[in-house]
Structures are given as C-alpha cells and as structure tokens.
Amino acid sequence: MEIDPFIFRLSIFILSIFIGYYVVWSVTPSLHTPLMSVTNAISSVIIVGAIIAGLSGGPQDIFNGSSIFGFLAISLAAINIFGGFLVTQRMLQMYKKKKKNK
Amino acid sequence: MSANLSAIFYLISGILFILALRGLSSPETSRKGNFFGILGMIIAITVTFLSVENFSSGFTYVLIFLLVGGLIGAFIAYKIPMTAMPELVAGFHSLVGLAAVFVAISAFLNPAAFNLGAPGDIKLSSLIEMSIGGAIGAITFSGSIIAFLKLRGIMSGSPITFKGQHLINLLLGLSIIVLIFYLCTTQLESFFWRLIAISFLLGLLLIIPIGGADMPVVISMLNSYSGWAAAGIGFTLENSALIITGALVGSSGAILSYIMCKGMNRSFFNVILGGFGATEETSKSQSKENKPVKSGNAEDAAFLMKNASSVIIVPGYGMAVAQAQHALREMVDTLKKNNIKVSYAIHPVAGRMPGHMNVLLAEANVPYDEVFELEEINNDFANTDVAFVIGANDVTNPAAKTDQQSPIYGMPVLDVEKCKSVLFVKRSLSPGYAGVDNELFYRSNTLMLFADAKKMTEQIIKNL
C-alpha cells in the first residue's frame, strides 16, 4: 500500500516544530524582539500562495473573484516581508558590544 | 521548472529560515541570520515565479502589487520609532493573518488553480486544511488589530470584561468546528463565509478582555497563531517552505508565550481568560494606611549615586512611555566616568513585548554585554550600592516572595530591596498594573523620586 503524500508533509511539519523548539530556546532573551519581527517576515512566505492565487485568472480574465484576493494578499505579504526584514536589520544594527578601550 | 526541482528549492529556503532563527542565538551572528532569511525569501519568490507556466499579463500586476506592498513596508520600517515596536509587531501579525485568509478564500473560489479539484468538489483534506488556515488567520487578524489598538493607546489598555464572555467564546469556538464539519460535507460557499466571519469575531473577543501589561503574552500568542495559519495554508498548497516556516514560527511564538507566562508566574489560561488587575483595586484602597514614604529630589539621587561604587538600573514600561532611554544612557556615561560600575537588570516581562527593554537600550547605544537577565543578575543586588528603578513596579515588589495573599505571589522578581539604597523614579504612589501596592515604597532604604522618568533623569545628570 502506498503512503499518502499528506503523511510526508505531516512529517516535515512535526519535525520542523521540533527544530523550531530547539532553535528558539537557544535564542538569547535580549533578541526576543528581533525574533518576533523576523518570524513575522518569514511567515510572509505565504506570498508564494498569494502569487499562485493572483495568477489564477489567466490572460483573458486577470481580475476575477479569486485573483483579486490573491493580489491583495501579495501586497499584504510584501509589506510584511520588506517591513519585517528591514526593521529587524535596523534593530540588529543597534546591538553593539562594549568598546574595549574607552 | 519541474515540480520536483521547485520542491527542492522550497526546502532550501525552509532551511535558510531555520538558519535565520539560529543566528539570533547571539547578537554577533544575528545579522548574518537575517541575511539568510532574506535569501530564503528571495529563493522562494523566484521559484514560485519560475514554476508558473502561463506567463500571462497578470504577471505585471503581481509585480506591481508586490512593489506597492514592498514600498509601504520599507517606508514603515525606516520611519517607525523603536518605542513603537510592540504595536508594529502586532500590526505585522494582523497582515500575515489577513494574507492567510485571502489565500484561503482564493483557493476556495478557484481550487483548480491550486490543483485542489473543482469548485464544489474540493479534495476533502485540502478543504479541511484551508478552512483551518483561514480560520486561524482570521483570528490572528482581528486579535492583532485589537492588540495594536491597545498598544497604540487608541483603545484603553485596561481589560474590558462582561458577563458570559467565556461562554460566548466557547460557543464561537465550537461553532467554528461545526461549520468546518458542515463545509466539508456540503462544500457550500455560505458555510465558508460564515466560518471566516465567526473567526474574525472570536479573534476580537479573545483579546478584548486582556489588559495592557499582559500584552507580552498576547503578542507572542498571536505570533504563534500567525505561524499555524501559514502552516495550514502550506498544507493546502503542498508547499514545504510554508509548512516548515509555519511550524518554526508557531513553535517560536508558543515558547515566547511560555517564557512570558513564567515571568509572571501565571498559567497561560489565566492570562488568556483575562480580566487580571480589573477587580483588585477595591480591596487595596482600604488597606492603604498612611505609611511613611521617603521622597527626594534629583540632588539627593545624584548624591547617592556619586558616592556609590556600583549601580544597577532596573528599567520598565515607564521608561518606554517617557522615552527616557537616551537620557538614562547619558546619566550612566557620567557615572562611568566617575568609575562607578553600572549594569542593567531586565525582567522577562518588563515592557509590552518580549525583549522590549533590550531593544530600547540598544537604541540608546547601551552595549548589550552590560544588560543582564533576571537570573544572571539577581544575586548581585546584595552587593550593590544603589538600585535605580525607572518605570518598573510590580517586577520589583518583594511581596511576591513573602505575601501569600498577594495576587503576584510566586512571580519571579528582581531583588532590588537587597541593595543598600533604592531609587524609585515614579510619577505617584499608585499601584502598578497588578493593582498591588508595592511594599518597596515604604522601606527605609527606598527613596522615591516623584517625576516623569525622562525629566528626573535629566535633572540628575545636571546634578552629577
């Protein structure tokens, strides 16, 4: 009997939860705010779904009920991607070590 | 591009996202981590473009919408002041949630584009996945909007409670499950819209009763939700990058919520059920006798600190409100010039989001190796001359260790009372968020400095 591909995806999902668990515990507490903004940015990888949705109309019918939601989702996710990564970058730039000889 | 090849690239971008989080284990590696995250995102988007076979004119519109969103995002990222970080993060969560809802709607209306079957005949597993993804996305969206309004101060930060609240939420939660069941058996569009609408409503009602100082938990929880929503959509689209990311973000948010709850010694459900701090006031006002309070001015504070050999700074939300972090750094610089050892002690729930104080101090150019967490520094208070409490309250209350009647009993607190003297910058004697009077105000080694945190710090600098 063949294994349903869903089971493979479920395996990826569960293993990723474990990876996430161990990786996040190793994040230093002082970087918890950048952690939130960067997770925000990466969860916007949902944009791949939005792009497929936006292109679902085909050449004759670019804007239909389904693709409009796709286009809107592209913009929302893009705000998050650019905003999330850039603001994380801005925050991380500020974390500096003590200057040795002052 | 073949489906197998693109799946491999999605896996690569998933791995890069893991490395992005891994980088945050120390500030040195964090910038490289962020770069990995950006790289992962570029790969995911490029692969999606390449795997779309019909390059119709719709593609131009994809780029336009992408650019418009990107410009708005970049603009916000550059303009936002660091003190507004909690509401920014809440706002971003709401966008992820709404994007998940839109993708779910789009997939439901045009399942053929996603290889999920035909309208009215969507594969059962896909239908379940997209309704879960959409429902969690909707809860994330409306919940984050409320969190945003509360953090921004547009909506009152005090908890809003009403009778039967929990029962209503429970019923709404159950009806979501029932609606998913009916949607799957009938495939009717009307059930889908009702499901989304009820999820929006549940998100609103879940966050409304939760007060301002519990926001660190709420933000982390919504962070987690946005991850689960993304994972739900990832299952629908059979996309491993989304599944991996969703799982990472989901567990990240869950861990942060756990850390925040532990920092308050409260269970997750206690926080989520809300209303904390709303009912305490009546009993406390009676017990408030006229206990003696020593209050001082900036001169006294400067004198005490000048004669100290070590000072620990305890910042809290009040510092963020008064934007006192820069003045504080200046004060510390002056102290350091006088060879006084200065460090910072951060309580896990100080501020309105995890790591809030650390970011503000970093913004004010405080080196991160002078900033310590509760466990790292708590033993040092006993050997320190002066504790400078600026904008914190409940997290320093010794009653949490001794008074079993206190609502904050058992919460880990900073042992500031062990210092030789404690300087407490606060606008009045009013109790903190938990509605508990702080014993520390009446201790003989405490000097209250009644003023705005920023103004007081500036005056102290003048007197140093």
Image (cartoon, coloured by chain):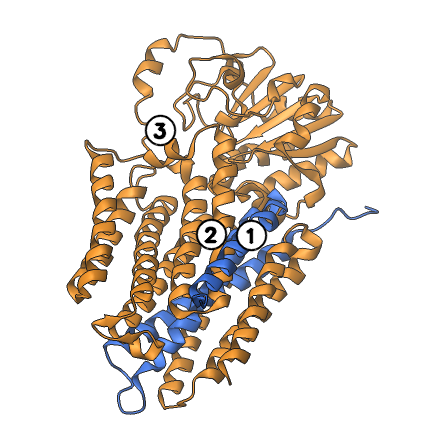
Chain colours: A blue, B orange
Q: Chain of mark 2?
A: B
Sort mark 3 into few (<14), some (14-19) or many (20+) by Cα contacts within 10 Å.
many
Report helix, strand or loop for mark 1: helix
The answer to whether any part of residue A37 appears in the image is no
Identify which amino acid the numbered label 3 is placed on.
Phe
First reached walking from the N terminus: tag 3 or tag 2: 2
The answer to whether any part of residue B224 appears in the image is yes
Report helix, strand or loop for mark 2: helix
Q: Please determine if labels 2 and 1 lie on a single subunit.
A: no
Rendering coords of residue A22 (x, y %): 60, 48
Based on the displayed image, in which of its 4 quarters is residue B37 positioned? Answer: bottom right
Question: Would you name the residue on which mark 2 appears?
Answer: B250
Rendering coords of residue B391 (x, y %): 51, 32
Question: Would you name the residue on which mark 1 appears?
Answer: A20
Left or right of A86: which side holds B222? left
**Identity of the residue furthest to the front in this view:** A1
Rendering coords of residue B387 (x, y %): 63, 25
**Residue at the image point whose x is 42% and y is 8% from the top:** B290
The disc label shown at residue B276, or none: 3
Identify which amino acid the numbered label 1 is placed on.
Gly
Q: Is residue A13 above or below residue B282?
A: below
Q: Chain of mark 3?
A: B
Q: Nearer the viewer, residue B253 or B373?
A: B253
**Residue at the image point whose x is 30% and y is 23% from the top:** B279
Mark 3 vs mark 2: give the one in front. Answer: 2
Check if mark 2's residue and mark 1's residue have beta carbons within 8 Å: yes
Sort mark 2 into few (<14), some (14-19) or many (20+) by Cα contacts within 10 Å.
many
**Residue at the image point whose x is 41% and y is 55% from the top:** B228
Check if mark 1's residue and mark 3's residue have beta carbons within 8 Å: no
Left or right of B268: which side holds B120? left
Left or right of B370: which side holds B90? left
Report helix, strand or loop for mark 3: loop
